[in-house]
Image (cartoon, grey):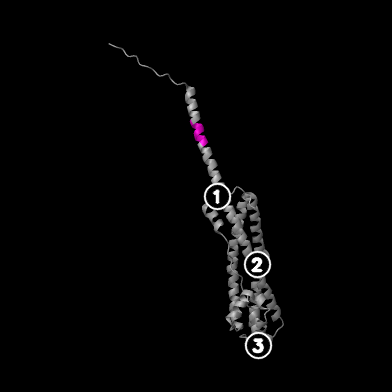
Amino acid sequence: MEVHQHTHTSRKKWTHYFWEFLMLFLAVTLGFFVENVREHYVERHRVKQYAFSLVNELKQDTAMINLVMFRIKRNIRMTDTLSAYLKKRELGQIKNIELYILSAIDRYPPYTWNRATIDQLKNSGSLRYFSNAEIVKSISSYDALTHHMDEDQKADDEMANRASQLRSEIVDMDYSKELTMGLRNNIDSMMMTTGLLEIMRSDSTKLLAKELTNIRIYLNEKMNVRKHLMIRSEEELPRLKKQAENLILLLKEEFHFN
């Protein structure tokens, strides 16, 4: 009877298992490291895209702010002219056409903020990708102030509506659509035309106001509107514009935009 001798594989040394474990550990660690580097690159690229879009939107906002400030200051000038015209005048010395022209402007255009990028940053939680805390703070501050300005404009519109109602009670506004639109859209240029001077000379439309008190009440409302418009044009909007310009500089420095 043949006896078969079993072969025995040699036992691996502990160092062999140690190196296997070490190689596996290094492979897993390297995988995590590569993935983190990839995610960091993707996040950095995404943040740079957000920053580029935000810079462009802020530039559009500053252009819009400039236009609104121009219109507000024009409104203030017209109110000052109206006040000077009515000063020490008796009811019989006030012409309907002149009061109609000087009271033509009573509000400024609505804000058209470019909020797409900021809203996306807030809704997606992507603000955390900005490593510069000053940029995050500036974005939040700017966004909050624009919403505050929206609320202010609602209040300004309510005051302007009250002034318009008072105006309709003292001034006969039965003039051509062309005159009305011209005064509303480009009153500075229209005031210099011979056509308007001719209308003013030949107009015989009578005031609706029967008492000077009603005109004074209207002027008081206009002066109240003016007070708030001064805050917008001299304080809030310049501060908002400065915030936008500073934020643009921060983003350009951080992401090396031209």
Q: Earlier in the sequence, mark 2 or mark 3?
A: 2
Q: Percent x, y for residue 96?
A: 64, 84
Q: Earlier in the sequence, mark 2 or mark 1?
A: 1
Give the residue displayed 67% in from the left and 72% down from the top: 74
Front residue of this view, candidates 223 and 105: 105
**Tag in front: 2 or 1:** 1
Inter-mark Cα distance, 2 to 3 = 35 Å
Inter-mark Cα distance, 2 to 1 = 34 Å
Residue picked out by circle 3? 202
Q: Percent x, y for residue 254?
A: 63, 49
Badge 3 crowding class, 10 Å Cα cut-off, few under 14, some 14 to 19, many 20 or more, is few
Q: Residue furthest left?
A: 1
Q: Which mark is residue 69?
A: 2
Write down the quadrant of residue 159 in the picture: bottom right
Q: Does 20 sit above or below residue 235?
A: above
Mark 3 residue type? Ser
Q: Earlier in the sequence, mark 3 or mark 1?
A: 1
Quadrant (top left, top right, bottom left, bottom right) of the N terminus? top left
Residue picked out by circle 1? 46
Q: Percent x, y for residue 71?
A: 64, 70
Q: Which mark is residue 176?
A: none
- Asked if the residues shown at circle 2 and circle 3 are in contact, with their CB atoms under 8 angstroms apart, the answer is no
Residue 166 seen by the camera: no
Q: Percent x, y for residue 48?
A: 58, 50
Give the residue displayed 66% in from the left and 76% down from the top: 189
What SS does tag 3 mark? helix
Mark 2 residue type? Met
What SS does tag 1 mark? helix
What SS does tag 2 mark? helix
Q: Which residues are magenta?
A: 24-30
Write down the quadrant of residue 145 in the picture: bottom right
Mark 1 residue type? Arg
